[in-house]
Image (spheres, helix red, strand yellow):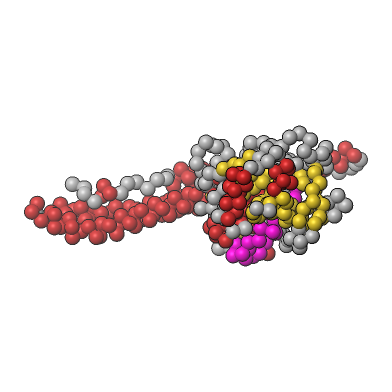
């Protein structure tokens, strides 16, 4: 009779099936490599072609070659990840089989004693059984972590960033690999983040960046964000990126989600710190990779998300909204915003949900704001934009523009942090979203 062996089950996964799929993916990579050779042959077939049409052909061919190269490299990386995962599954199955064998021996030992000794023998063997079951559970946990990492590596390797050209024909979704210097800088930033160093650029993800900035401005928020990023190492043990934990699943929006995303590239025209890609660049890249629409707007992309959605994606916790509608935040609503600030709750203020005509045809409104140095300065507020709430008190609200600066009517740029009275704030900011740091 089996007493102890029934305490464990089968280790999930089929190494042979994983290996078979890895071979298929590697074969697809070889096909992509052949396709690249065909493109090169087509390019050389018209050596004397000149003029505008030839230039357009060369430009299109360059883009196609780049795309096929990314696909080829991604398929080979995916195959390697699957091969490695297959080895891990096989190893944990072997270790689990050893545990099962030891438990079977203990079962045999228990079965060999007279019935009147069974209880005492059972109790005597229980400590050994507990250690073996602990080993088995540890193997399962490690295998689950390996599966999560393999999934993140596959998503990264096979990610195809949607095309997103702006009005000037610039590809907003272009990416570049993180360098050793980038990762050294980011590793240091994980110990001391600076929300003032967020500088939004070509991607319209102001709400996400404002949300990250609002979480980052508190010590417990920095600790939380740092816990969501883990260095990732290649097969040689060299750091090649980061595993980022996000609480979002765009393909299943009604489900609670916690996913790991491998980031080895950042957006060329994405957010930056003062010295280049930053911790926030890594989060932005992970967020874009997780969304099928990449840098595009709409429900599938990272541009235009709501504040409550952003906070849940960052923290995994629900957020609430306080509406002023471009009219007034009454005393109760002001108190809620002030209390959130005092309690270190992250908050975003958005220049949305306001009456038509609040902002001019260029999306601007000119206000007089107090800057951190105490000076009064006319600045532009931008319609349909999100700002980090730095603090709030009886005098008004201090905000930070995720651009890292504010434009002025005189075509200059001033500090991105500024203070508005409640009356001015209420007129231009129709909604405040308040989150919670875990």
Q: What residue is shown at x 85% (from left), y 55% (from top)? A: 412
Residue situated in front as seen by the camera: 413 or 344? 344
Pinpoint residue 29: horizontal percent, then vertical percent: 62, 45
Q: Is residue 161 magenta?
A: no
Is residue 153 visible in this depiction of the protein? no
Left or right: 410, with 381 as reference point: right
Question: Which residues are drawn in magenta?
Answer: 182-204
Q: Examine the image and state in which quarter residue 109 appears.
A: bottom left
Q: What residue is shown at x 39% (from left), y 54% (from top)? A: 139
Which residue in the rendered view is the most extreme toward the top? 356
Q: Is residue 201 magenta?
A: yes
Is residue 237 visible in this depiction of the protein? yes
Pinpoint residue 163: horizontal percent, then vertical percent: 72, 40
Q: What residue is shown at x 28% (from left), y 49% (from top)? A: 7
Pinpoint residue 432: horizontal percent, then vertical percent: 64, 44
Pinpoint residue 86: horizontal percent, then vertical percent: 47, 50
Q: Examine the image and state in which quarter residue 95 appears.
A: bottom left
Which residue in the rendered view is the most extreme toward the right? 51
Q: What residue is shown at x 25% (from left), y 60% (from top)? A: 128
Count of numbered badges drawn on the protein: 0
Q: Examine the image and state in which quarter residue 249 appears.
A: top right
Left or right: 76, with 420 as reference point: left
Residue situated in front as seen by the camera: 206 or 431? 431
């Amino acid at each position: 009779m089996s007493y102890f062996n029934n305490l464990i089950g089968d280790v999930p996964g089929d190494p042979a099936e994983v290996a078979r799929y890895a071979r298929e993916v590697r074969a697809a990579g070889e096909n992509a490599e052949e396709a690249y050779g065909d493109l090169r042959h087509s390019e050389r077939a018209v050596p004397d072609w000149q003029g505008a049409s030839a230039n357009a052909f060369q430009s299109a061919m360059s883009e196609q070659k780049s795309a096929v190269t990314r696909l080829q490299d991604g398929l080979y990386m995916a195959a390697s990840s699957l091969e490695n995962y297959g080895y891990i599954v096989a190893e944990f199955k072997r270790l689990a089989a050893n545990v099962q064998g030891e438990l079977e021996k203990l079962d045999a030992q228990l079965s060999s004693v007279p019935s009147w000794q069974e209880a005492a023998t059972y109790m005597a063997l229980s400590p050994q059984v507990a250690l073996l079951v602990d080993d088995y559970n540890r193997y399962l946990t490690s295998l689950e972590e390996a599966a999560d990492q393999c999934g993140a590596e596959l998503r990264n390797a096979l990610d195809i960033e949607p095309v997103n050209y702006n009005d000037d024909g610039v590809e907003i979704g272009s990416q570049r690999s993180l360098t050793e210097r980038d990762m050294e800088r980011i590793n240091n930033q994980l110990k001391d983040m600076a929300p003032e160093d967020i500088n939004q650029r070509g991607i319209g993800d102001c709400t996400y960046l404002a949300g990250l900035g609002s979480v980052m401005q508190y010590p417990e928020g920095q600790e939380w964000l740092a816990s969501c990023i883990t260095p990732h190492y290649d097969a040689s043990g060299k750091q090649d990126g980061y595993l980022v934990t996000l609480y979002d699943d765009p393909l299943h929006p009604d489900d609670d989600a916690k996913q790991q995303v491998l980031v080895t590239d950042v957006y060329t025209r994405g957010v930056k710190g003062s010295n280049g890609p930053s911790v926030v660049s890594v989060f932005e890249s992970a967020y874009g990779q997780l969304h099928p629409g990449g840098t595009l707007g709409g429900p599938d992309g990272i541009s235009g998300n709501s504040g409550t959605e952003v906070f849940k994606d960052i923290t995994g916790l629900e957020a609430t909204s306080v509406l002023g509608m471009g009219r007034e935040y009454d005393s109760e609503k002001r108190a809620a915003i002030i209390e959130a600030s005092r309690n270190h709750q992250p908050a975003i203020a958005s220049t949305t949900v306001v009456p038509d005509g609040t902002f001019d045809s260029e999306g601007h409104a000119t206000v007089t704001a107090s800057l951190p140095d105490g000076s009064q300065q006319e600045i532009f507020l931008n319609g349909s934009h999100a700002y980090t709430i730095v603090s709030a008190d009886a005098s008004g609200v201090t905000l930070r523009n995720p651009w890292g600066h504010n434009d002025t009517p005189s075509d200059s740029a001033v500090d991105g942090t500024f203070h508005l009275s409640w009356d001015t704030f209420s007129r231009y900011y129709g909604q405040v979203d308040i989150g919670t740091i875990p």
